[in-house]
Image (cartoon, rainbow, N blue to C red):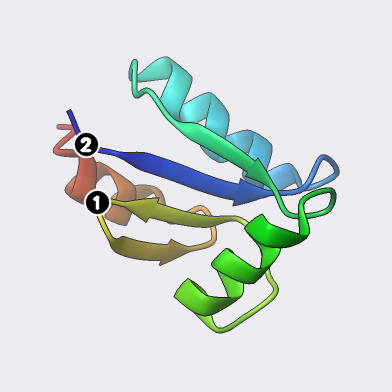
Amino acid sequence: MKQVIIYSTPSCGWCKAAKQYFTEHNVAYTEKDVAADVFARDEMLQKSKQMGVPVIDIDGEITIGFNQPRLAQLLEIA
């Protein structure tokens, strides 16, 4: 199983869409709220070099935004 981390904020619509996509495809993920967690925010910045969310880390491969085709490819979802 792939390790999936999503860096998000509570008010982010694209973050909600990504989490819904993971749920629909039975993908386990760890959510890090960068609005409340300064350490998660710093970690996200180090990985992505930007403040926009969502930032999704799948086994070290970074995806910025809700890019469904890329997520499907990385997660091997048909």
Q: Is residue 70 rendered to the left or right of residue 64?
A: left
Quarter of the figure with residue 60: bottom left
Name which residue lies at 73% across and 54% down: 34
Is the residue under label 2 in contact with that under label 1 (CB below 8 Å)?
yes
Q: Quadrant of residue 44?
A: bottom right
* Residue count near mark 2 (Cα–Cα under 10 Å), binned few <14, some 14–19, many ≥20: some
Toward the viewer: 47 or 20? 47
Amino acid of disc 1: Asp
Question: Would residue 10 be found to the left or right of residue 5 on screen?
Answer: right
Mark 1 and mark 2: span between their CA atoms? 6 Å
In this view of the protein, which residue sits in the foreground, 38 or 1?
A: 38
Residue 29, how many percent across, how many down?
Answer: 43, 30
Quarter of the image where the C terminus is located: top left
Q: Which residue is mark 1?
A: 59
- The image position of residue 2, as x and y in percent, is 21, 36
Task: Determine the secondary structure under disc 2.
Answer: loop
Note whether 39 is above or below 18 in the view shown.
below
> In the picture shown, does residue 39 fall above or below 6?
below
Q: Please identify the quadrant where the N terminus is shown.
A: top left
Residue shown at 60% from the left, 55% from the top: 54
Q: Which residue is mark 2?
A: 2
Q: Residues within 10 Å of mark 1 (few under 14, many from 20)?
A: few
Residue found 40% across the figure and 63% down from its top = 63
Q: Where's residue 74, x and y in %?
A: 21, 49
Three-letter code for the amino acid on which mark 2 is drawn: Lys
Q: Mark 1 or mark 2: name the one nearer the start of the chain.
A: 2
Tell how many labels.
2
| 45 relative to 15, above or below | below
**In this view of the protein, which residue sits in the foreground, 19 or 48?**
48
The numbered dot on residue 24 is none
Helix, strand, or loop for circle 1? loop
